[in-house]
Amino acid sequence: MSIRRPLSGPIGFNAQHSPMGAFMSFTCGNPGTKGGIGLQIGQPADQEVFIGLIDGDRYADATLKCLPFYVGAASNAAEAFMVEQAGPSEANVRPDAEPFAENEIKRSYGWATDSWEAGDLTFTVFSPFGPIPDPSKSSDRDMRDALRPAVVAQLIIDNTKGTKPKTGIFALNHSRPGPRMITDDLGGSARVGFAFRREAGVAAEVVDITGNGASDKPHAFGFMRWSATDGIREKFNPVHLLGSCPGIGFEVPAGKRYAMTLAIGSYLEAPVTTGLSGKYLYTRYYTDLTDVLRSTLDAAAKVIEKSDALDAKLEAATLSDDQKFLIAHATHSYYGSTQLLEIDKQPFWVVNEGEYCMMNTLDLSVDHVFWELDHNPWVVKNLLDNFVSHYSYTDKVKVYKDAGVSVHSFDHDPSQPPPPPDAAQLSRAYETAPGGISFCHDMGAHNNFAPKGRSSYELANLTSTFSYMTVEQLCNWTLTAACYLAKTRDTSWLKKNKKIVEEVLESFVNRGGEVGFAQFDSDKTAGGQEITTYDSLDHSLAQTRNNVYMAVKCWASYRALNLLFRDLGDKKAAQKAQELAEKVAGFVADQAVDGVLPAIFEKDNPGYNSRILPAVEGCVYPYYFAKTGYAGIKPEEVYASAAEKRMYDALKLHTEKLLLDPEKRSVFADGGIKLSSTSNNSWMSKISIFLDVTRRVFGLNANPAVAEVIKKADAAHVTWQAVGSAYWACCDQIVSGEGKASRYYPRIITSALWID
């Protein structure tokens, strides 16, 4: 096991510890709250987690000291059975445990590990990640290793300096009935386990790691009562099948150091989705929960070794400690949302949208794409194909009969309901014109696939949150497809989708008007208007039409289409896409006022006076095309045309001026990045992309003043996560330093762009 440096900042935050593709997390870390094993939910689970030790044998009259991952004295489940008894034994147990104080605990947090040290106790969770093999090309053994729906943990009790035994325990107090002890064969008589019905469980074995010669052959013991304390100490009936708190313990003699290795896993065998009936792909390779837990204990040494290697890799990166923390935290939460299903005997990749559990939200997928292409490109192809097959649609665009003022979107607290539809917008008359293909916002929610051609999110007659994102998602599918080609050069896939790519270009043209980008709303919105992924922000980012963020993203999409048509051998379409890219670039450059760009290119819109940093977001894609060699040019040659060079210069100056603004309208008081000058809602995933463009595309970190702003921002962003979002693990939407929405979220994996 590698030596890990303790965190120097806040340590009381939750983290998700998850296998790949199982939509399962073991969550803990936030003092005084519940966590444990959560399946298919967008929040921490509801178990009290007891990880602790007794200074004595299991029956000693000594305090059980635990890491503070529980609410307090456990609610007494026995009271439901003991109505009138005066002082029943289990109703009068001492408080369940005494927590270690914060100053007694050290925490180390790595890319694939999370470790706490308190006194003679060390507890570590190992959740390695890596490529998920393509099932169509891989052996069952490789798939079994990759998709094992479990993580490994280890509880070490060091009694080498002690003069009497110590007892270590791991227990989960459930708020729902259903815990049981595992009586199946876990791979040896020394292994002990407990489970929650057939769904999830823990198995353990104990080894002597004293390392001073002859080793003991210790055994773990199981218990299940209504509290951890009672379960450990009960001599005659340690297992009561009505109990709510199963656990595993082990005694460590004086002079010894023992480690209890834990397999924490899940197994859902029946179909878990509706609409499209799907079950977990891992059920092809595992027979039941016992098989999962047994296999995990067998593989524990390799899991620990792989986790240590990943920690070492991130530690060696030329990044600050703050940046490393953010990447590690993001990775933990990303995998907690992943779900690999089998539908119609074919794999079906899903990333759930954090607390909302929307499935494959396309405006998140385009942000995840860089990470997924680095690890398992086949899931990106799977995603693209499933959007085409199930979640694409054709629309028309609205041409208004008047030249009325654009509807103003509202900045609102994302934890509150959105504002009502805009009355003036609902009554505006319009005609329709050809639109074209686009793609749904998502594929459904909470394991319920939406009907074909529909999302769970989008509704008509709205002007902000829950409206349609037609142009946004058209860009997102296009950019994801081009990134996939950039990484894989899979021209056979491209040729199969030639018609779709042609329809995509036509759709962009129909929506672009005279300037080439996002001039018309989809008729799907009826009396509403289209929005962007920044749905809960104000007028500066929520509106699609004439938005600088969308303009640059459409420019990037045209550059993507130029490359796709090049590979299809369609020189005419490739040239058309490039001409449109230059047209949009020139238009964007022309909008600059005093060195900065308006958020909305409409002078009668309040967004005209807003300034947004995501104006530069689209620049990340052509940089990727060049960096991978797909574009056939160097990154610095992306902006070769005169119009694109002018846009580049305008965006770079815009970024520099906003970051160094004397009034600090683009940074919060704590130094964190403020995406919009007129909104206090800032998104960590998008900040990560912005910072990557600032450093790599514009090279602005060479400016000491900008570098100092970024350094302070990184530190503030750590506090946003570790303090402002402590219960919710990794959080995206931060309002004035506090996690307000998009919690338990995968999207912040964009921070991994910083690793080169």
Image: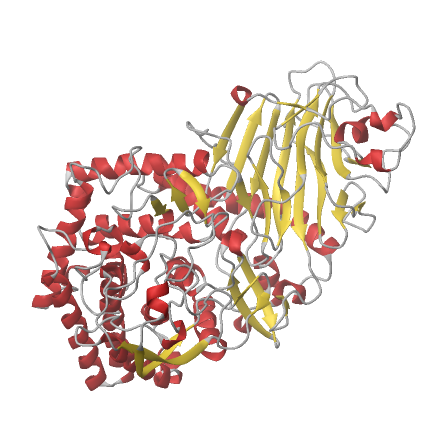
Q: Nearer the viewer, residue 496 or 393?
A: 393
Residue 753 visible: no
Q: Nearer the viewer, residue 116 or 250?
A: 116
Residue 486 in the figure: left or right of residue 348:
left
Locate residue 212, reporting x and y percent.
Answer: 64, 25
Q: Nearer the viewer, residue 354 or 138?
A: 354
The colour mode here is secondary structure
Question: In the picture shown, does residue 168 fall above or below 48?
Answer: above
Locate residue 504, reporting x and y percent.
Answer: 32, 79
| Numbered circles on residues, count | 0
Q: Quadrant of residue 642?
A: bottom left
Locate residue 485, reporting x and y percent.
Answer: 34, 72
Residue 356 in the figure: left or right of residue 57:
left
Question: In the picture shown, does residue 280 fall above or below 452?
Answer: above
Question: In the picture shown, does residue 611 fall above or below 434?
Answer: above
Residue 371 in the figure: left or right of residue 303:
left
Residue found 22% across the figure and 60% down from its top: 548
Q: Nearer the viewer, residue 177 or 205?
A: 177
Question: In the picture shown, does residue 511 fall above or below 283?
Answer: below
Residue found 40% across the figure and 75% down from its top: 524
Residue found 22% across the figure and 41% down from its top: 665
Q: Quadrant of residue 241?
A: top right
Locate residue 276, reporting x and y percent.
Answer: 60, 73
Residue 297 visible: yes
Residue found 42% across the figure and 53% down from its top: 747
* Residue extending furthest toward the top: 163
